Amino acid sequence: MRFGLKVQIFSGLITFLSVLSISQYQFLHATNKPLHTQQRIEQHQSQDSSVFYSVIDEWQKYKYSVNGKSILRPMKLPNTKVNFNANDLLFVLINTRKYFQDHSQKDPNISRNGLLLSQGVKVENVLKTLDFMISTLREDVKKNRPSRLQDPNFINTNFRVIKWNAYHPDKPEQKQLRITKYAVFTHPGSRTKTSTYNIPIYSLKDNLATDKFYTKYTKQEVLSGIYEPGGKEFGKVDTLAYLTRQGLEEALMQGTILINFTDGSKGFFNVDRNNGISYIRGVKDTLQKRYWYFRPVDQIKGYGYKIDAKISIRPGVTFAGDVLNIGLGRVVLIEYNQGKNKRLQMGVVADTGGAFLPNLHQLDYLAGIFKNQTEFKQYIGQLPEYANAYILVKK
């Protein structure tokens, strides 16, 4: 009798462990999805019409999942005139479209459908949107008339309008997008080291950039003099200019700097490659370990997989954003109140930065070229800190 009871208990235990093992496997299989299932995750649609999307960071690593249809919803644009400079917007649209045409093979990141797939929007729809806007603006500019893209009725007729509700993992109550602002600052600088201008900005030499030696050093180590005469890496980089420490930090943060040299010349310089260390939100600029190497450029540059491919951009019509999860070339309208009047501002996601990978709750507006922080802050005082946001997709 006791033996039979033992057999029953043993059999029951085996059954229990088998069920538990299967349940654990199913749970782990459901929750620990590898990155290579990204496309299937994007395309999976459950019975309640929610589309789950896996958000990734700048190193292509999974961060968290979101319900795309709770973030993006079809809407109609408010009956308010849309603001933009037609020539500047056309310039950025053309350059962004050309980037897709010239670099889609070497830059697979721009072929990601991203979160917009939850609304059935693919990269091909984004390209059709850019093409239609370019042709419309060209015709309007040629005929010297107000652009039809400023008319909300024209937009509602020809475009799908998708409202973008902010998703902030740490602030679930935030629904509007945070609109930060960035700029190109003009800074005095020197071609040679002086007592005032003693902080160098460097460029990687073409013949040495591939060995990744520069990824071994933090910003603090670079500034300690490793590339200067007597330093252990002397000769591996070129010195482009010398700035103040404030000038360097603003150049690193903004991505582009316009230097007025003491010899009377001037030039734009844009970030090229970084040391592979992530930007940490909330950490003081001087304590950030991320460091960028620069290259001389002919104008303000935005997104690009390498310095020679970067998109030429202009202020007032350019947003920096999450190009991996929202996507490059997405046309965005922000809606906010200016005094008693409602305002709609149009721009293109044609730039990015470390603070935007990932980031589904913020855009950075390229405000302009400024002499100093005081001038910059006076200008952006009229701009919103938060705004409603809409993404346009050609019907």
Image (cartoon, rainbow, N blue to C red):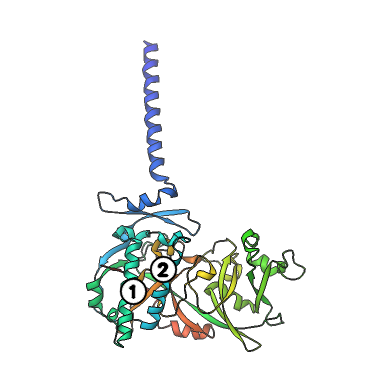
Q: How many marks?
A: 2
Q: Which of the 4 image quadrants contains residue 385?
A: bottom left
Query: What residue is pinned by disc 1?
Result: 333
Q: Is residue 78 above or below residue 371?
A: above
Q: Amino acid at mark 1?
A: Leu
| Residue 192 in view here | yes
Q: Residue at x 45, y 67 (%)?
A: 102
Q: Is residue 140 above or below residue 119?
A: below
Report x, y in % for residue 76.
Answer: 24, 71
Q: Amino acid at mark 2?
A: Gln
325 lies left or right of 354: left
109 lies left or right of 76: right
Q: Residue at x 36, y 64 (%)?
A: 173
Q: Which of the 4 image quadrants contains residue 263?
A: bottom right
How far apart marks 1 and 2 lie (CA) works out to: 13 Å
Closer to the camera in the image, 337 or 195: 195
**The C terminus lies in which quarter of the figure?**
bottom left
Report x, y in % for residue 336.
Answer: 33, 77
